[in-house]
Amino acid sequence: MLTGGNVNDCSRFTHVMAAIRVERSGPGRPRVRPDHVIADKGYSSKAIREHLRRRGVGHTIPERADQQANRHRRGSRGGRPPVFDKQLYKRRNVVERCFNRLKQCRSVATRYDKTATSFQATVTIAALLQWL
C-alpha cells in the first residue's frame, strides 16, 4: 500500500492486513490471514496487538522502552509482557535487506517521483532489476 512520505506505517497497518491476498496452489479462495506477523518496535501498539489477537494471527513485535516502563510503573496492574520470540524475530532481517536493496535505486530512496503511480512503477522496475 502506497502512502505519502510523511505518513507513518503503523497508521495503515489494518489497511495493509485487509489487502493481503495469497493465492493457493490448488483450487479455492486466496488466503487473507497470515499465520504470523513479525514487525519492529514501530508497530508495538495496543491497537495493533488487539487487531492481530482478534483475527487469530500470531505476532512477534518487541515492546518499546516507554511501554515497558509504564507496565513496570503500574506494578501488578500493568499485566504481563507480550510474548516475544527472539529467534523468530531474527528472521525479520530478510525483509529489511530486501528494502535496502530496493533503495540502491536512487529514485526509490529519494522519492523523486511526484505521483503515486510513477513512484509505484519505479519500485516495480527496481524490484524487477533485483529479480534478474
Image (cartoon, helix red, strand yellow):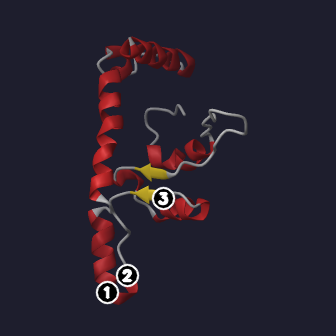
The dot on residue 58 is 3
Three-letter residue code for mark 2:
Gly
Residue at horizontal 36 percent and vertical 36 percent from the top: 95
Q: CA distance from mark 3 to mark 1?
A: 26 Å
Q: Which mark is residue 78?
A: 2
Q: Are marks 1 and 2 in contact (CB under 8 Å)?
A: yes
**Which one is in front, 76 or 95?**
95
Q: Quadrant of residue 29?
A: top right
Residue under the point 63% across and 45% down: 32
What secondary structure is marked by label 1?
helix
The relative height of residue 119 versus residue 70 in the rendered view (above or below) is above
Kindly state the secondary structure of the residue where label 2 is placed: helix
The residue pinned by badge 1 equals: 75
Give how far apart the Cα atoms at labels 1 and 2 are. 5 Å
* Labels 3 and 1: the sequence-earlier one: 3
Q: How far is the residue under mark 3 from the one under mark 2?
A: 22 Å
Dot 3 crowding, Cα within 10 Å, few <14, some 14–19, many 20+: some
Q: Is residue 131 above or below residue 7?
A: above
Q: Which one is in front, 23 or 60?
A: 23
Q: Of helix, strand and loop, which one carries label 3? A: strand
Q: Residue furthest bottom?
A: 76
Q: Is residue 30 above or below residue 56?
A: above
Question: Which is more N-terminal, label 2 or label 3?
Answer: 3
Apparent side of residue 18 relative to residue 64 in the rendered image (left or right): right
